Amino acid sequence: MLKPNMPSVNDQEDTQVPAGFPAIIDAHVHIFPGKIFSAIWKWFDENGWHIRYQMTSSRVIEFLLSHGVQHIIAFQYAHKPGIANKLNEYMLDKCAEHSNKVTGMATIYPGEENAIDILQNAFASGLEGLKLHAHVQCFDMNSDDMMRVYECCSEFNKPIVMHVGREPKSTAYLCDPHKICSVDKLEHVLQDFPNLKICVPHLGLDETVAYRKLIEKYDNLWLDTTMAIAGYFPLKDKINLEHYRSDRVMYGSDFPNIPYAWDRELKILKRANISRDVLAKITHENATEFFSIKGGSIS
């Protein structure tokens, strides 16, 4: 699904979230130190799409907050061993710059030496969960190393956001996501760790139907909408949010790593055949529960 020279979309962007919207938590925002961000922009230029918003991390946060997003969940992922500590320190610094408006997630490189020590230190320092990306980090979610990660998150009562849907895959990754990612693999984790909150981004592309059924079975699983409802990827199954379990879906943008306007999915949500109560769940209530966000930060 991810291939070179994918189209940029020159759609119109507005300066504020849609009028009359409930409060908005963007549950999927990326920030990185400058050199890593530049490398990501280059990688996407060569292997995917041109990233429309090439900004510093501080500008990413300021942009969304100034455009009416009330709270941001900020992610990074360590693409190699030996850098997770520095990335976690960077995340803590950015959260401190925007007190009560940014929830920062930790990173580790699964399987690296001292990964659990790094994660424990990140949680003790104030990061509120863990973000992992199987396509980039090439981990098997059912490995012994990952079992220790789940145990650590459970012990600290911290959620995990794991990109373990099979798409968008790319030949530029060092592993084949279709071999290491599947609904069945994740279901074993959900069964073994029933008190561990897990979110799978992108509604679980490309197994969206199976993931929709999985959130009906397990109370510890959430999904986010990121890029899945934007109409950018060709999907074999149409996504109708009215058919999803309404308390287990969160809005996320993937900002700034997108090829279209920052508010594209918000406009689609506004047109969706869902009630005002369901819209509020998707835009902020479910994220508030998943990430344990204090209410005052989204007022």
Image (tube, helix red, strand yellow):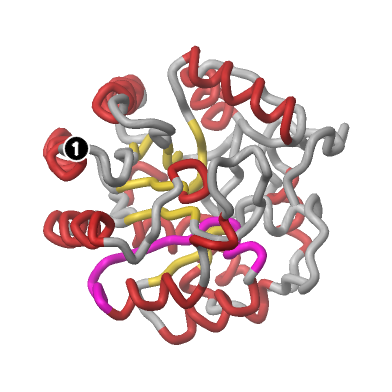
- Reply above or below: 163 against 11: below
**In which quadrant of the rendered view does residue 66 lie?**
top right
The answer to whether residue 84 is left or right of residue 35 is left
Q: Residue 293: horizontal and vertical position, in percent?
A: 31, 50
Q: Is residue 194 left or right of residue 178?
A: left
Q: Position of residue 187 (x, y in %)?
A: 41, 77
Q: Quadrant of the C terminus?
A: top left
Which sits in the foreground, 146 or 132? Answer: 146
- The count of marks equals 1
Residue 205 on the magenta segment:
yes
Residue 40 lies in quadrant: top right
How packed is label 1: few (under 14 Cα within 10 Å), some, or many (20 or more)?
A: few
- Residue span colored magenta: 192-206
**Residue 20 in sight:** no
Is 112 located above or below residue 212 in the figure? Answer: above
Q: State the residue position of label 1.
A: 113
Q: For mark 1, give the secondary structure.
A: loop
Q: Is residue 73 left or right of residue 270?
A: left
Residue occupying image coordinates x 16% and y 55%: 152
Q: Residue at x 50, y 41 (%)?
A: 136
Q: Is residue 253 visible?
A: yes
Horizontal and vertical percent position of residue 243: 65, 81
Q: Amino acid at mark 1?
A: Glu
The residue under the point 30% across, 80% down is 191
From this view, report whether residue 113 is shown above or below residue 55. below
Question: Is residue 259 in the magenta section?
Answer: no
